[in-house]
Image (cartoon, helix red, strand yellow):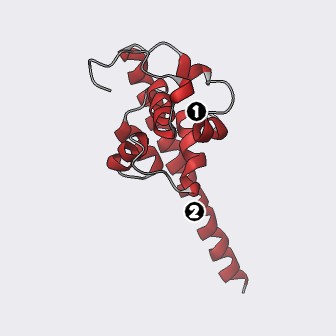
Amino acid sequence: MTETTPTNWYAEPHATFGDRLEAARTAAGMTTAGLAAVLGVQKKTIEAWEADRSEPRANRLQMLAGAVGVPLVWLMTGAGAVPRTVDAEPLPDSARAALDELAQLRRSALALAEEAVQMEQRVRSLLQENAA
């Protein structure tokens, strides 16, 4: 969105997948770069999805809906009620900063959990080697 775009630019009856994605991302207080980092894709990929130049593969759709906090069916089709978070007033900068911090903590926790899983697999492998 540009600075001249009104805050109520989102209109559900005419929304495309890209419109819904941008509205949900914005309502979640995420930047395109932030969402790209969460999903492990490039920023230009998010921008292409939001501009309806391309669409995410099936394996990314559920992650995408979860990352922006909306139901998958709504994100894909617009079916159902507009999620309250999308219809909400824009967040103040301080709230967005706090949400960005929270998202970073969530990413760190997920990375730590993945490390724990890998360590557990290593320990199990070592135990199996010692048992043989």
Image quadrant in which you'd find residue 71: top right
Q: Amino acid at mark 1?
A: Gly
The answer to whether 80 is drawn above or below residue 65 in the figure is: above
Q: Nearer the viewer, residue 24 or 131?
A: 24
Disc nearer the start of the sequence (2/1): 1
Which numbered disc covers residue 69?
Answer: 1
Q: Can you say which quadrant of the picture contains the N terminus?
A: top left
In the orientation shown, which residue stands out farthest toward the left?
Answer: 3
Residue 123: horizontal and vertical position, in percent?
62, 68
Q: Nearer the viewer, residue 130 or 90?
A: 90
Crowding near the residue tagged with mark 2, few <14, some 14–19, many ≥20 C-alpha atoms within 10 Å: few
Residue 86: horizontal and vertical position, in percent?
54, 23
Residue under label 2: 119
Disc 2 to disc 1, C-alpha distance: 30 Å
Q: Is residue 16 left or right of residue 9?
A: right
Residue at left offset 51%, top offset 33%: 20
Residue at left offset 64%, top offset 75%: 125
The answer to whether 34 is drawn above or below residue 111 in the figure is: above
